Image (tube, rainbow, N blue to C red):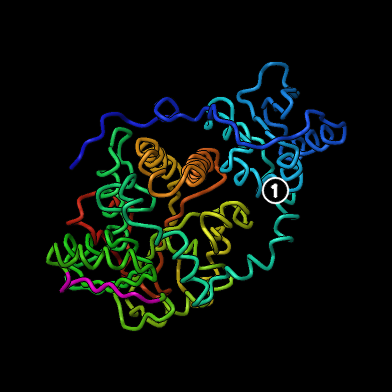
């Protein structure tokens, strides 16, 4: 197992990555004059997003700030067209303009993002309303129907296994890791997450498990190898399924794990456990009762389940830029929305754990590795892609640090199932004691 040299932190990540603005300026021209209405629009936009402590530099070199020299970073707006887009919808257009270098961050990108995320209104303000109305037909096309889900997953997950290999762990686990100690490295933390999930499911040798949305197959293979279960794992990403099948054959587990290229809605069988790690974000809240029906149809009377998902403290759409350019169709749920999966089918929620800071730490590792490989990423794609994914990963770190995003693990069982742990001790011991104490 490869050992990392340093533990990531806000300082080490910032120092290892060149977040400062590029010295190359985009090839475009704009008049030097800044009109009073443009300054008015700029100040109105800044108030709308909470007036973060930033210094704004306009295309003619003029600086504007309300913070008396206490700005934590600067933002260089290179042309008036960029300013007008930001005024219309900063949530949507900042990412686009940053990726195209029409807007640049002067200073540390993480400091800039934290300054914005700490003050950006979370409730009571319509964020991105104009942009979402203009793009309504586009978003409608990306709803998570059977065909829409395939298009959405292809957009994000089928852009190349070689790209993800640059910055994920050795097993290609693209979900929140679990860090038992602060100095746990990424490889160890992802294995710890896989065990954490398996212990929560209280897996026993000989049981059958269905996994909805299996990524590159790490959890399915881990369950079969270390817990003696048989797994059917569903995924609609061609690239991920091909990788998982190849790995299963190479490790001699293809007789115990079946990777199925199909939608979760087509799951058929009878299983002791249902598990989904990192898929619910792509289901769409309008399909939650349908997901509950799938679980109810396939889970044994004595069955139990776990859903691991990015979540929110209150229901709201994914930010417009991420939904459009990075994760089409994504919609992390609130806990209240998740109950639409369980309540119609009388499932009992047994435990809810929030691993928000574990995901922030996971993303710090991913971002540091990404920055170590930006030249290779640029060769695979282009500089606009490099900047877009830098912003996505850095923004995700800050979303989890500041509480804008949560990471929920929810375990559940049928209402009359009494073979459940008496305490939470079973979560933290060796997996040989995964069954825990029960009563019934």
Magenta residues (range): 254-262
- The residue depicted at 48 percent of the width and 42 percent of the height is 383
Residue 228 is situated, as x and y percent measured from the top left of the image, at: 16, 66
Pointer 1 residue: 123
Number of residues whose C-alpha sits closer than 10 Å to that of mark 1, classed few (under 14), some (14–19) or many (20 or more): few
For mark 1, give the secondary structure.
loop
For the N terminus, which image quadrant? top left
Residues 325 and 433: in front is 325
Q: In this view, does 276 lie to the left or right of 314?
A: left
Residue 177 is situated, as x and y percent measured from the top left of the image, at: 35, 47
- The residue depicted at 60 percent of the width and 36 percent of the height is 26
- Specify the farthest residue to the top: 69
For the C terminus, which image quadrant? bottom left
Task: Specify the quadrant of the image occupied by residue 59.
Answer: top right
Residue 297 is situated, as x and y percent measured from the top left of the image, at: 40, 83
* Picture mark count: 1
- The vertical placement of 394 against 21, above or below, is below
Residue 315 is situated, as x and y percent measured from the top left of the image, at: 62, 57
Q: Is residue 170 left or right of residue 13?
A: left
The answer to whether residue 260 is magenta is yes
- Specify the farthest residue to the right: 36
- The vertical placement of 101 against 380, above or below, is above
- Specify the farthest residue to the left: 252
- The residue depicted at 56 percent of the width and 43 percent of the height is 99
């Amino acid at each position: 197992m490869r050992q990392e040299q340093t533990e990531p932190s806000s300082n080490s990540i910032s120092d290892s990555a060149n977040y400062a603005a590029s010295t190359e300026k985009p090839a475009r021209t704009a008049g030097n004059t800044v009109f009073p209405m443009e300054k008015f629009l700029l100040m109105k936009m800044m108030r709308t997003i909470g007036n973060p402590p930033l210094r704004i530099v306009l295309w003619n070199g003029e600086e504007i700030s309300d913070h008396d020299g206490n700005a934590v970073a600067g933002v260089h707006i290179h042309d008036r067209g960029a300013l007008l887009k930001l005024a219309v919808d900063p949530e949507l257009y900042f990412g686009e303009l940053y990726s195209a270098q029409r807007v640049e961050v002067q200073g540390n990108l993480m400091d800039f993002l934290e300054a914005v995320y700490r003050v950006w209104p979370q409730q009571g303000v319509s964020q991105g309303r104009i942009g979402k109305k203009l793009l309504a037909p586009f978003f409608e096309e990306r709803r998570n129907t059977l065909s829409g889900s395939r298009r959405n997953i292809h957009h994000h997950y089928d852009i190349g296994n070689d790209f993800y290999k640059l910055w994920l762990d050795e097993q290609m686990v693209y979900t929140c890791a679990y860090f038992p100690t602060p100095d746990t490295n990424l490889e160890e933390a992802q294995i710890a997450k896989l065990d954490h999930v398996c212990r929560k499911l209280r897996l026993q040798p000989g049981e059958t498990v269905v996994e909805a949305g299996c990524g590159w197959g790490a959890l399915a293979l881990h369950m079969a190898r270390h817990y003696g279960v048989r797994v059917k794992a569903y995924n609609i990403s061609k690239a991920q399924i091909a990788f998982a099948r190849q790995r299963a054959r190479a490790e001699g587990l293809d007789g115990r794990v079946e990777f199925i290229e199909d939608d979760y809605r087509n799951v058929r069988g009878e299983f002791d456990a249902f598990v989904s790690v990192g898929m619910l974000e792509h289901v769409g809240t309008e399909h939650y009762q349908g997901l509950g029906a799938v679980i109810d149809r396939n889970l044994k009377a004595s069955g139990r389940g776990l859903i691991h998902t990015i979540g929110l403290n209150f229901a709201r759409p994914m930010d417009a830029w991420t939904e459009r350019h990075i994760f089409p169709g994504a919609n992390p749920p609130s806990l209240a929305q998740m109950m639409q999966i369980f309540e119609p089918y009388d499932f009992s929620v047994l435990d809810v754990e929030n691993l928000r800071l574990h995901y922030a730490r996971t993303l710090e590792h991913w971002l540091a590795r990404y920055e170590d490989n930006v030249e290779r990423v640029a060769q695979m794609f282009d500089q606009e892609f490099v900047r877009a994914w830098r912003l996505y990963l850095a923004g995700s770190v800050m979303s989890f640090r500041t509480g804008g995003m949560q990471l929920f693990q929810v375990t559940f069982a049928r209402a009359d199932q009494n073979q459940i742990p008496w305490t939470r001790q079973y979560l933290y011991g060796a997996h040989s004691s995964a069954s825990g104490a029960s009563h019934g």
